[in-house]
Image (spheres, grey):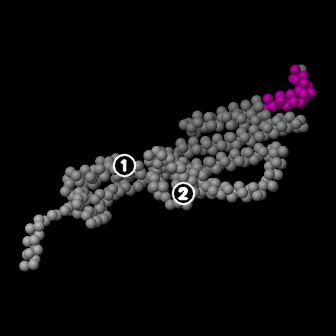
Amino acid sequence: MMLEQVKNFLGNHEILSLFFWVILGMLAGLVVFLVLITLFKRAIKSLYPTLYGKITIKLRKPLLMLCLVTGALIPFILIPNENILMRVSQKILITLLIVSTAWLLIKGIHVIRLFLMSKYEIGGEDNLKARKLFTQYEILERIMVFVIIFIALGISLMTFEPIRQIGMSLLTSAGVSALIIGLAAQRIIAAFLAGIQLAITQPIRIDDVVVVEGEWGRIEEINLTFVVVKIWDKRRLVLPTTYFIETPFQNWTMTSAEILGTVYIYTDYKFPVKDLREILGTFLKESPKWDGEVNVLQVTGAGEKTMELRVLMSARNASDAWDLRVFMREKILTYLQEKYPEHLPRTRIEIEREIDRNKKENKKSG
């Protein structure tokens, strides 16, 4: 009896009836959300227990919004109504559905990043594969987010008839404006395309060691239009992406993090190179930065007053190579000062007495 009275009452009040079904639809959407999130939690907890909390936090809100909006929209589809208020409400719900779907997709892209971070450690020593993957994904992630937002915005505007007509009229009458904007945006478009090219060809990757503009640093961030290089003294050098396409630069870790370090020493010609070559390995073993691969001492130059010695050594990465070079330079100089101080570079001046010189000249003339 009570249900029939409610049905008759709602039948005579279309707006209240639709509102009632909307509430029921949202409750049904809430139930669906609880079921989905429970199943999702169980699956993630069993497969990725360490990522369980982070993934749930990222996806919970957009999924809840999507379920509630879908449940609220179903009555509008099943119960046709020509009321202007109902039609506007339906358009708003469709827009919210598009927004929540885009939100969920963007959060899904962020979840993929969490999976990559758990599988590949970018902070490790041999992190070439991880840096390559993260560089590629970071740029593609920004592109995908931009495309999702752009498409969601376009579809949302197309749901409203007046805005769609205005947009079409603007497109048909904006030929000259589009040409001017296109010319003005050439550099932006070039930077955008250069960012995509960096993601595909990868002349640089996240955490690569590079020398740009005479500065030594690491690639800290790669965006679609610019790249941030962290200089050794903690400054940041911001360069457009086109710089790494058009300008030559040094990449010390493009194929491997391993690198050779050099130390140049200048000594007198009488210095016994063999002695330093024999003790060089002992010096290198004292440093944990040496990877045990390369240990070379060569005479690479012979100047007017000194000879040039080059010490070549290897390290696991550029930072270790720098520390190793500093250490070896100090050890070798200390060794020369203590063992062979007479063979350090010096300028010799010989002064003969006037008498001795005259005697020598007389002997020659006689």
User: Where is residue 324 drawn, in percent x and y?
Assistant: 35, 50
Q: Is residue 17 magenta?
A: yes
According to the picture, the residue beneath numbered tag 2 turns out to be 244
* Amino acid bearing label 1: Asp
**Image height of 68 relative to 190, above or below:** above
Q: Can you say which quadrant of the picture contains the C terminus?
A: bottom left
User: Where is residue 243 drawn, in percent x and y?
Assistant: 55, 57
According to the picture, the residue beneath numbered tag 1 turns out to be 323
Disc 1/disc 2 C-alpha distance (Å): 28 Å
SS type, badge 2? helix
User: Where is residue 10 drawn, in percent x and y?
Assistant: 89, 27
Q: Is residue 18 magenta?
A: yes
Residue depicted at 33% across the width and 56% down the height: 263
User: Does the rendering let one see residue 172?
Assistant: yes
Q: Can you say which quadrant of the picture contains the N terminus?
A: top right
Q: Are marks 1 and 2 in contact (CB under 8 Å)?
A: no
Specify whether 197 is left or right of 17.
left
Q: From which residue to which does the magenta span run?
A: 2-25
User: Does the rendering let one see residue 36?
Assistant: no
Q: Main secondary structure of the magenta part?
A: helix
- Total marks placed: 2
Q: Quadrant of residue 352?
A: bottom left
Specify whether 233 is left or right of 264.
right
